Image (spheres, rainbow, N blue to C red):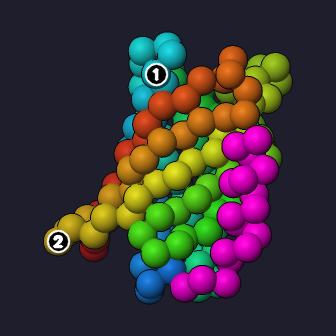
Amino acid sequence: MKHLFFVACLISLTGLNGFSQNLSGVWKGKMDVAAWFFEQRINFVFIKINDSAYRAYSNSYMPGDSDSSMCLMQGVLIKHTLYLEEKEIIKYYHNDTSATCKQLMKLTFIQRKKKAILMGDWYTDEDKCGHGTITLTKRDD
């Protein structure tokens, strides 16, 4: 049910302006997994499609491991909130194709003097896949 609501928001609100925030570029941060009590390092590359729509590629790294998973995401920025949905798993962590849960994210955009922050929650439609928080930062050059 959450998934249907999320998709409906993306479809119906893509025309709303993102208030000129440009999320394009490389973001780095962490994703806490509430059910398993650990955090993953993550990197996102955002590509702006139009005023409010974005495509993103994410890399997630498990603690103490250099291998990563890579996903394609799509989303929309509405006011100061970014709604993201994983659309495709491009690379599986250690080629384990059993991990098929795709995430939904609701992130708040915050602009600071020398960096921008995206922070919020992630979840899935499947209870077995967990949920948690995510924090990303992008340094101004």
User: SS at mark 2?
Assistant: loop
Q: Tell me which residue sits at (43%, 37%) in the image.
A: 133
Inspect the image, locate mark 2, and give the three-letter code of the amino acid beneath it: Lys
Q: Position of residue 35 (x, y in %)?
A: 51, 16
Looking at the image, is 41 positioned above or below residue 72?
above
Q: Position of residue 128 (x, y in %)?
A: 69, 17
Looking at the image, is 72 positioned above or below residue 60?
below
Q: Tell me which residue sits at (67%, 34%) in the image.
A: 124
| CA–CA distance in space, label 2 to label 1 | 30 Å
The residue that disc 2 covers is 113
Crowd class of label 2 (few under 14; some 14 to 19; many from 20; radius 10 Å): few
Give the residues drawn in magenta, as a range. Answer: 1-17
Looking at the image, is 62 positioned above or below residue 118?
above
- Most common secondary structure along the magenta stretch: helix
Please give the label number shown on residue 11: none
Q: Residue furthest left?
A: 113
The residue that disc 1 covers is 34
